[in-house]
Image (cartoon, rainbow, N blue to C red):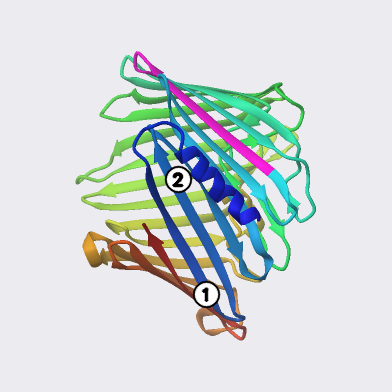
Amino acid sequence: MKARLWLSLVVCFSTIGAGQFTLSGNWSATVNLLPTMSLDNALTLKAGVNGWTVGGTAEWLGADGYVWQTLTAGGAFGPAEVELEMLFGPLAPAYLYTLGKVKITISGIDLILYSAHVGPTVPGYFFGGPSGGMVAVTKADVGGLKVSAEIGFGARLTDFTITYTGIGTYTKTYPVDPFPGGLQFTYLGLEVNAIPLCCGITLDSKFTFTKLGFDALAFTLKEIPLCCGISFDTVVKFTTTAKTVELVPRWKGIEGCLAVYGDALFVGNNWQGIEIYGFKVRCALADCNYLELLTAFNVAKIEEILKKDIFQGPEFEYLRFGFCGPGCCGEKYSVTLTAYFQPMGSLFGLRRFAAEAQVPVMANFTVNLKLGATVGGPANLALGWTFTF
């Protein structure tokens, strides 16, 4: 019954107006073969009429079944570009989240309004609702400078994650985080990019503060020359919990990035030094070909800064190699190989290996492969595909 609801909505919207009707979509499936067998499915349908697109995506995940249902709409309303997305939890059943975006361009100035709302807390779905708010963003070129300002009332432009926990655990992440408390002032951000300095060096800067005071300060110095055609960018960011520094060297088509993550140590008001949490080196060798090394001296801090669950158990480091090449029908295949290391206990400290590949076999059909193995532990293997129409 629920599965037919969003299909009915697509058909309903498609009958509005006498404009040309189009129907498109895709079907993605993953067969998990190891360590246990399960099947994940996602079906997306979109209907276009009179410049508007409406549709939805239904997701059936493993033994939990019908976990997510998304409804979307987008199009032009006069001078405004409108996007709307709603998320539901069919297993409850429950309304979970709404994200809206309206964009208007006037005399080269972009005015963007984001809105977000979270439904009430539902058993199985954890996200801390209900709450809602909006963020207004203005972007413009002023005398060659790229200037933007954003102000949030009960919301912020930062990732917001909804989690469902049943037999498995699944997440959905959105770009606007609504806070409880209604439409009260939340934060203000000011950003100025492409500030010209001497010798071809430019400066990007961004400052944000909340009603509690300072929140974050970031600045980037670009194209700092060294010699022999070598230059680099420097990215420095200060927040209330950490400081990060990134160095991005550039030399004749080979780009590298060194990111150092850490925080300043104070005793009272006296600065005692800098604590380094870890670093990341990424070398871009060619188009989508790269080598990346991440080393964490403090795993919890690194995962907090990067906002990712990266390591398992005693792991503290990974080495990743990604590459691509020409595939069928003008598309490209891509492969990612990652080795995870622990301090001791195995040859070279290797603890886990993971591989992912996406290979187009037809213009509208791509095969996906995931493989993983842990030293002394179970292996995982998944085979999937994406069919578009």
Q: How many marks?
A: 2
Query: Which disc, if any, is residue 246?
Result: 2
* Residue at 59% over, 53% down: 4
Q: Main secondary structure of the magenta part?
A: strand
Which of marks 2 and 1 precedes in the sequence?
Answer: 1
- Looking at the image, which is closer to me, 357 or 194? 357
Q: Is residue 104 magenta?
A: yes
Q: CA distance from mark 1 to mark 2?
A: 39 Å
Q: Kindly tell me whether residue 276 is visible in this rendering.
A: no
From the viewer's perspective, is 314 left or right of 12?
right
Is residue 90 placed above or below 264 in the rendered structure? below
* Residue at 55% over, 43% down: 9
Q: Name the kind of residue labelled 2 in the image.
A: Glu
- Look at the numbered disc 2 and give the secondary structure of its residue: strand
Q: Quadrant of the N terminus?
A: bottom right
Residue at label 1? 31
Q: Is residue 389 magenta?
A: no
CB under 8 Å between callouts 1 and 2?
no
* Residue at 63% over, 59% down: 299
